[in-house]
Image (cartoon, grey):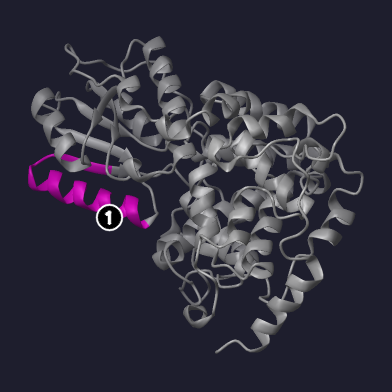
Amino acid sequence: MTDSPILLWFRRDLRLSDHPALTEAAESGRPVIPVFLLDEVLEDHGAAPKWRMGLAVERFAERLSEKGARLILRRGRALETLRDLVEETGAGAVWWTRLYDPLARDRDERVKAGLKDDGVDARSFHGHVLFEPWTVETKTGGYYKVYTPMWRAVRDRDPGRALPAPKEWRHPGTWPDSDRLEDWKLGAAMNRGAAVVANHVTVGEDAASHRLGAFMAHKIDHYGEARDIPGTDGTSGLSENLTYGEIGPRSCWEAGRRAIEEGKKGAETFLQELVWREFAYHLVYHTPRLMTGNWKEDWDAFPWNEDERKAEVKAWKRGRTGMELVDAAMREMHVTGTMHNRGRMIVASYLTKHLMTHWKIGCRWFEEHLIDWDPASNSLGWQWSAGSGPDATPYFRVFNPETQVDRFDKDGTYRRAWIAENRGNPAKTALAFFDCIPRSWNMSPEDDYPEPVVGAKEGRQRALDAYENRPF
């Protein structure tokens, strides 16, 4: 079996550098067959993440082709499909990069057990996070439930170096058949929105590396302040690329550490944001319920609205709440597939507190529309905002959309970029919103901008009254 092929199963690690599994496979001297599956986990992705994954796969296949290799595409349940490929190729091993969310873990455990029963070397490797969740422990041996102590625990820890891309590796004498990516129709659910969001994507390993370099060269020094201003291009944008593994977390960490050594002021804040992503996966691994239910189980008794048909919930989804900062953020997501982090906190607070609506509704809406959707970070972010999660903002803290305007968009730059109604000369980005939303919404830039469905003071008081009378 020492000369049998290795099936290298790619998932959220669509890169050649900082890839321990690929490096070890290349160094083994055995033929390597890269594989990507449209399996039971990917089939359930929302419209935007599935479409964006298709772009990532397409670009990665091109990159492999430049190396004289191929990316073999197959559709079907993971274990059965990999077994078929093992039989077709005579592979003696199937290797992959570990994931930590419960759906991926359940799938991977089934695959590993089944393949090992078949006598196949089924092996998983580190690479999706900086630190494996079970390697970061409190002084008493438990997992971290609060972010800041975890940050202190890992800030000076060495995650290991980012491995360079292998210069070459051995290819099989004969390649197995592959599906055609276009036949999968991964963008079907995007409908006309795909053409609009396509103007805002940055796809592939080379583009991600350039994005990181440009951020470190031009933005990192002011990142600590600029990252909070939605109307300013002050963030790295790397969440999109980290989601699909087009860049590895260790590459980002190394760049951040170098920036600290160079005295760049925003570098430590950048590393803190990387560790927030780690914190999300740390929690999802240790408490999988973060993905599906209230992390603080007492909140199961809280009387949130769970009816998505309510007019005010529909208004929130469509960017028509009458609160300009909320609506601007929701429209940014429709047009670009992303949303500024300050906007994410504001829209989440408005839905869960002003509208008293369950965080699960917002979590699912983001899962449908974000091209940088990450299963762990999305769930943690929503529960943090709602007050039901670990390290949560105090449940009685209610973001006031009007005072948030004064602090983060006083000159109106962000709102002008995304709201067209009642504007004499709307921005192109604001008009693009009407080109990507469903026609059934029957919305037009000529409409009058709506009055608030729930006002800032009214909603805050409603939330505080509910919290005072909460049944726990």
Residue extending furthest right? 411
Q: Position of residue 39 (x, y in %)?
A: 27, 39
Q: Residue at x 73, y 45 (%)?
A: 328
| Residue at 18% from the left image edge and 42% from the top image edge | 79
Q: Which sits in the foreground, 280 or 91? A: 280
Q: Quadrant of residue 462?
A: bottom right
- Residue 40, given in percent of the width and then of the height, sits at 27, 44
Can the viewer see residue 352 in this picture? yes
Picture layout, residue 189 above or below residue 71: below
Residue 16 visible at all? no
How crowded pointer 1 is (Cα within 10 Å; few <14, some 14-19, many 20+) is rated as few
Label 1 is placed on what type of residue? Asp
Local SS, label 1: helix
* Quadrant of the image occupied by residue 91: top left
Q: Position of residue 131 (x, y in %)?
A: 48, 52
Prevailing secondary structure of the magenta residues: helix
Residue 188: x percent and y percent? 40, 30
288 up-or-down from 107: above or below = below
In the image, what residue occupies the spot 44% across and 54% down?
132
Q: Nearer the viewer, residue 444 or 252?
A: 444
Give the residue drawn at x 47%, y 35%.
245
Q: Quadrant of the C terminus?
A: bottom right
Which residue position is annotated with label 1? 106
Q: Is residue 107 magenta?
A: yes
Specify start and end residues of the magenta stretch as a single range: 102-123
Q: Image quadrant of residue 151?
A: bottom right
Using the image as rendered, state which of residue 263 and residue 222 is in the foreground: 222
* In-image side of 286 versus 250 (left or right): left
Q: Is residue 317 magenta?
A: no
Left or right, 220 with reference to 345: right
Is 319 positioned to the left or the right of 51 in the image? right
